Image (spheres, grey):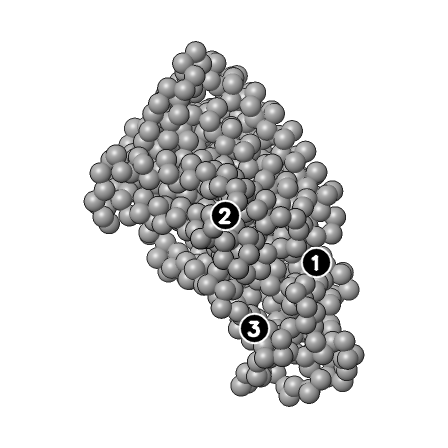
């Protein structure tokens, strides 16, 4: 069943366009704008160019999804297979199935929303031309990672995103941006070197780099020792990108220093590349090696869940001077721990839960980083003590729509039933209750119990954040200095017309000295509404996503045999 009937040749073109168009757009962004397209100034023209290119890619991704045969999600569709390096049997092999299609659409959506947001709120830094070009190169590399079906092409696409993200952090980031950017690039590059050795080992020992052929063979052409070595090497590189505890320490620094759109893309897109590699490469190609390391992967995953939650609780407590962006970054360590736990179960239930949690995390954490960036722009800081202690009525009283949306994203992140965050965590825990044959049930049920405890910790720190940031500290007699009357943003004082009236039923009378904040701007609503809406849709109608992933996962685990 397809939503619209599209010929195979058009599907091939759409997928190739989705991968290549951002790269061509990045080159075009560095050229002078044509005379009729300059707008008010060259900077506006190049930002409009970024919105146009990412918008065209998003439209192509939606049309591709509409033309996808939903009755055969386990079959590779829109495939292109061209010989590239005959001596090594390396091919330009593209294709999508029910596993990669949701990630492709998510990447196109988040990049477009970031480009739209940047058109109105460009982060302070060097040339807008370079900013737009880097975002487009980043998009091209990420989309290629989810579309290629050759191990060496996968590695090239996997590495392609590192340089643009490094410069986005180093040139457009905040405090400590240089150190954070270097930490990001060193961790990921070192992991990638080891991963390349593992990919070459598989390709040379099996005689092919084709991921479809390797998945169909299901490891029968590789000895157990080769599989174990390959999983160790490739898994290390993927674990750094995920990131898995204890290889996560680059992530909080990178998120804290990155500009808002950099954090959204890092959390919503780049982290998914690591877990996608586990599902697409290691599970079907080296199942014996994965079975050897699955208990260790699960153990690291649940430690990451608890560790990330405890770090968030430490940052959220009063007097800790915790940074809200850093707290959301540590929450990602915990959420990605659930994804890794689902993968480690090696069961259809757990892996479907991991893939669902991937998409949910991209939507919810992408929205959270957008919101935290907006709060930081309004207050001039993301320090939790400042946000909670010196804000009078806090967000509910000063910017009620912004506060309500932050509360919505927080409860979605903690896994409230009916929202997207619930299903992924629940399915991964179900998968851990009954892991694949050959894995220790007592061990995995222990991991399940620890993971379930992590969900309670997640609820605790998210509710603390909502209480402190949205409600503020109880300070009925506090008086604000004159400087607090007009909160500063990077663009100057908030306009007086941005004030909003106190909503009915809000806690307590408001002092006349309580300063107002601009509530949600129209461009912010345009960038955030799709993420909030999809969070609700995925939570209420999970079958849309699970119907795509489950047949593909079943076939992947069966060695290409449905």
Task: Tell me the quarter of the picture where residue 7 sits.
Answer: top left
* Residue corresponding to mark 2: 33
Q: Secondary structure at mark 1?
A: loop
Residue 100 position in % (x across, y down): 40, 39
Q: Residue at x 45, y 38 (%)?
A: 24
Residue 494 position in % (x across, y down): 64, 73
The numbered mark at residue 387 is none
Separation of residues labelled 2 and 3 (CA atoms): 34 Å
* Residue corresponding to mark 3: 519
Q: Secondary structure at mark 2?
A: loop
For the question of whether residue 484 can be seen, the reply is yes
Query: In the shown orientation, is residue 41 left or right of residue 3?
Result: right
Residue 17 position in % (x across, y down): 37, 38
Q: Which of the marked residues, 2 or 3, is nearer the chain's N terminus?
A: 2
Q: Quadrant of the N terminus?
A: top left
Rendered view: 83 above or below 283: above
* Residue corresponding to mark 1: 323
């Amino acid at each position: 069943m397809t939503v619209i009937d599209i010929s195979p040749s058009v599907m091939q073109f759409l997928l190739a366009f989705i991968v290549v168009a951002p790269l061509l757009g990045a080159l075009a962004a560095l050229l002078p704008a044509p005379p009729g397209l300059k707008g008010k100034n060259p900077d506006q023209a190049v930002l409009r160019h970024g919105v146009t290119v990412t918008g065209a890619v998003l439209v192509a991704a939606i049309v591709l999804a509409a033309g996808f045969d939903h009755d055969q999600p386990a079959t590779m569709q829109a495939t292109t297979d061209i010989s590239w390096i005959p001596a090594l049997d390396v091919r330009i092999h593209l294709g999508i199935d029910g596993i990669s299609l949701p990630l492709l659409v998510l990447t196109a959506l988040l990049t477009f929303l970031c480009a739209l947001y940047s058109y109105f709120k460009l982060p302070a830094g060097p040339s807008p031309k370079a900013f737009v070009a880097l975002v487009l190169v980043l998009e091209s590399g990420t989309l290629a990672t989810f579309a290629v079906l050759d191990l060496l092409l996968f590695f090239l696409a996997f590495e392609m995103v590192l340089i643009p993200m490094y410069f986005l952090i180093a040139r457009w980031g905040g405090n400590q941006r240089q150190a954070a950017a270097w930490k990001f690039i060193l961790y990921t590059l070192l992991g990638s070197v080891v991963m390349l050795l593992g990919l070459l080992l598989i390709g040379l020992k099996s005689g092919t780099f084709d991921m479809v052929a390797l998945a169909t063979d299901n490891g029968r052409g590789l000895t157990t020792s080769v599989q174990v070595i390959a999983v160790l090497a490739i898994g290390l590189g993927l674990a750094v990108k995920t990131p898995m505890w204890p290889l996560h320490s680059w992530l909080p620094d990178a998120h804290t220093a990155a500009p808002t759109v950099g954090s959204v893309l890092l959390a919503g897109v780049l982290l998914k590349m690591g877990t996608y590699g586990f599902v697409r490469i290691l599970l079907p190609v080296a199942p014996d090696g994965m079975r050897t390391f699955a208990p260790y992967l699960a153990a690291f995953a649940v430690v990451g869940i608890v560790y990330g939650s405890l770090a968030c609780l430490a940052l959220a407590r009063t007097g800790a001077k915790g940074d809200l962006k850093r707290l959301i970054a540590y929450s990602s360590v915990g959420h990605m721990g659930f994804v890794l736990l689902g993968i480690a179960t090696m069961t259809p239930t757990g892996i479907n839960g991991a893939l669902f949690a991937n998409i949910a995390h991209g939507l919810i954490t992408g929205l959270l980083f957008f919101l935290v960036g907006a709060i930081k722009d309004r207050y001039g800081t993301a320090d939790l003590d400042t946000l909670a202690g010196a804000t009078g009525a806090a967000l509910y009283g000063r910017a009620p729509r912004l506060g309500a949306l932050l509360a919505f994203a927080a409860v979605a992140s903690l896994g409230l039933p009916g929202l997207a965050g619930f299903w992924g965590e629940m399915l991964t825990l179900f998968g851990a209750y009954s892991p694949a044959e050959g894995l220790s049930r007592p061990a995995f049920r222990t991991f399940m119990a620890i993971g379930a405890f992590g969900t309670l910790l997640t609820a605790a720190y998210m509710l603390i954040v909502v209480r402190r940031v949205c409600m503020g500290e109880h300070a009925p007699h506090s008086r604000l200095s004159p400087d607090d009357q007009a909160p500063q943003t990077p663009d100057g004082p908030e306009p007086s017309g941005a004030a909003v009236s106190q909503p009915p039923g809000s806690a307590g009378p408001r002092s006349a000295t309580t300063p107002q904040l601009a509530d949600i701007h129209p461009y912010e609503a345009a960038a955030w509404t799709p993420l909030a809406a999809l969070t609700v849709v995925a939570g209420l109608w999970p079958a849309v996503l699970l119907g795509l992933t489950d047949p593909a996962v079943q076939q992947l685990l069966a060695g290409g045999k449905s």
